[in-house]
Image (cartoon, rainbow, N blue to C red):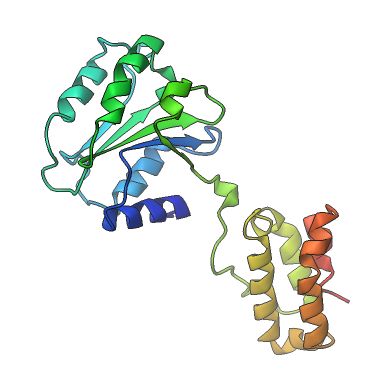
Amino acid sequence: MTDNLQTILFKKYQDKLLASLYIVNYDSRSIDPDLWVNQFMTQLTSIADHPDVLKIHKAEKETEYKVDSIQIRDFLKFINYRPLQLEKKFIFLFDAQDISTILSNKLLKVFEELGPNFCLFLMVPDNAPLLPTVLSRAIKLQIPNKKELISTAPDFSEIQTPQDLLAYLKQNRESASAAQDEKKFIEQVIQHCLTQSKLSSEPFKNLDELLKILADYETYSNFNNSKLARMTRFFP
């Protein structure tokens, strides 16, 4: 499933607005950065090993990237040539926090002079340190956790009564409580309820009451009521 960040980056690529250097943070407990990169690149090309794409991993026995690392030499060669097919050449450097201090200092000039033909992503697990000199030269991005992703069309097909809906909210409170989408989720629940004859008269006395409950949502959020407690206000 394509996440919002991938969609935004793809749109920037189409509009020729991609920057040259990004730091991409991710939660290593729930995100596979290789898989994320593959998903993103499928939007740009169907070729698995595209000549305009370079993925850099540390050698098996290396603890850090060094000036004489083969992968770094390959990277420096890669940026000597313009893209063949894509609008840009893409470089994904995994575990960028393991770039040695000496190499980081040597790469600063390279980072600054990448130019419009290249887009370098430094893939870094959350809370892993990077040198301030590197941080200051890049745009920082965050891959959303899987638990933060919410379906735009929740499946309410099994809901036939108010009790079914409350049970659904209890079972799905993780997805229903995605920080940025909880209110949207509740609105979708309401929309479903209003279109179901068995639900329209029982849980909601009238539309005015329903709209007042929705308007009160942010007030209740400010008092740190549990998400499930806020949702149960939609029932008599």
* 75 vs 178: above or below: above
Q: Position of residue 131 (x, y in %)?
A: 46, 20
Residue 194 rendering spot, x and y as whole percentages: 69, 85
Q: Residue at x 76, y 73 (%)?
A: 214
Quadrant assignment, res 64? top left
Give the position of the C terminus as an image quadrant: bottom right
Please indicate whether residue 11 sits to the left or right of residue 28 in the image.
left
Q: In percent of the image, x 71 and y 90: which residue is there?
A: 197
Please tell me which residue lies in front, 104 or 55. 104
Horizontal side of 122 relative to 204 (left or right) equals left
- Residue at 26 percent across and 52 percent down: it is 44
Residue at the right extreme, as displayed: 236
Of residues 186 and 214, the one nearer the viewer is: 214
Can you see residue 72?
yes
Q: Position of residue 105 (x, y in %)?
A: 35, 15
Is 183 located above or below residue 79 in the figure? below
**Which quadrant holds residue 84?**
top left
- Quadrant in the picture for the N terminus: bottom left
Q: Is residue 222 left or right of residue 47?
A: right
Residue 78 occupies quadrant:
top left
Report the number of discs: 0
Query: In this rendering, does residue 63 appear at all?
Result: no
Residue 204, image x and y in percent? Answer: 81, 83
Please determine whether, in this image, residue 193 is positioned above or below residue 217: below
In this rendering, the answer to whether 63 lies above or below 142 is: above
Residue depicted at 20% across the width and 18% down the height: 73
Most foreground residue, 29 or 157: 29
